[in-house]
Amino acid sequence: MAKKFFYNKVYNTKRTIINVVIIGACILGIVLCFIFVSRFKGESHEKKLTYDLNTAGVTIEVNEEYTNAIFLTRINDDTDLTKIHVKYPSNFDITKSGVYDVKITIDGDEANKEYSIPLTVIDIVKPDLVTKQLTIKEKEQYIATQFVESCTDNSTHDCHIDFYKDGTDEDGNIVNYEEYTDVGTYPIKIVATDDDGNENVQETMLIIESDSTTTPDDPGNPDDPNTPDTPSIPEPVCKYGSNEYDTDEYVLTTDITTNGCALSLDLYQDAIDYYEDNLSKKTLRKVIDNEILRIKKDVEALNLIGILRLEQHITVVLNDTGRGLVGYQLNIIVTKEDSNHNIEKIA
């Protein structure tokens, strides 16, 4: 009886252990299957994501806010931008223009590669310059910054303030600000330049008053016709007409007027000659370069397939009377050539 009880007890214990092992194995198998299926689905989902990297490079403006989407030429609706990791070089500075080599890695990328993409930071935005009128006495000195109310730049760096050295009168004569010493009212052009050479030229006025003042005991009678009035800014008398022009016909790119007056048409050819001789130094060259960069950036955002070409030419902008020169108009044509050499005009 004891022997039967003993063997029965041992047998039942073995069965219990076997059952526990079987149940544990089943649970472990279910967990492993669940993990496998989950990982398989995750990998399948990753493979469905299409990451088309813009390995040719991307361009942004200084201090521009952006996401990792800028490194893609095509974005699917289910693209998770957190899976795109960007490693910037140690010299990367979004406040300064330059070309930076960034490294891109992507979670789920089958090739498991580190991609190298040039990130170009450009500055084609001129400073925001606000000028003010300055009144001084005879023989007083003045400097360019005294005519500035405020100046800010998108790079957050300081503006460089100076008198506009290329300022001309109606006949094209270079203005010499040191000659402004007599009592009177004079037009002043101030130029603000950022670190990348973008210029903003604004016009203001310099008023030079007589240094002879009325004594405090005799302030003068306002009703007395002999009491001197406060100097007033005279209306400009324009030899070649005002700087008003037909905005429906022209898009003004560079304004070269002064004191609200158009310049002589004879200056047009002189300016073109100077432009050809000093291509790298002339303001028009800077305007062209900046506009091309801006348009190129806008066109790249369209993700067009094909060879893009940008052509530019300059035309003169006349005032309403057609007698005076107001400035220059920059025309840029963007075309695309496909693999079959078909050319399509984009803009």
Image (cartoon, rainbow, N blue to C red):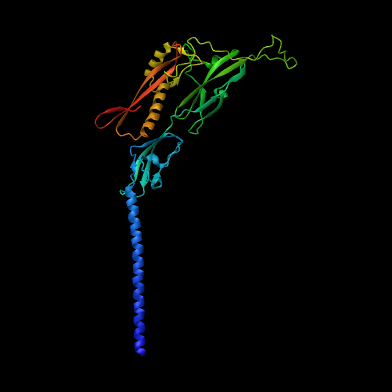
Name the quadrant containing residue 295. Answer: top left
78 lies above or below 60: below
Residue sitting farthest toward the bottom: 1
204 lies above or below 98: above
Residue under the image location 35 percent in, 37 percent down: 57
Name the quadrant containing residue 21. Answer: bottom left
Q: Quadrant of the N terminus?
A: bottom left
Q: In this view, does 304 lie to the left or right of 199?
A: left
Name the quadrant containing residue 101. Answer: top left
Q: How many marks?
A: 0
Q: Position of residue 29 (x, y in %)?
A: 33, 65
Q: Where is residue 189 in the image (x, y as percent from the top left)?
A: 52, 19
Q: Is residue 276 left or right of residue 140?
A: left
Name the one closer to the observer, 244 or 294: 244
Q: Can residue 282 be seen in this view?
A: no
Q: Position of residue 335 (x, y in %)?
A: 32, 27
Q: Position of residue 98 (x, y in %)?
A: 41, 34
Residue under the image location 41 percent in, 47 percent down: 82
Q: Can residue 37 be seen in this view?
A: yes
75 lies above or below 231: below
Name the one closer to the observer, 340 or 61: 340
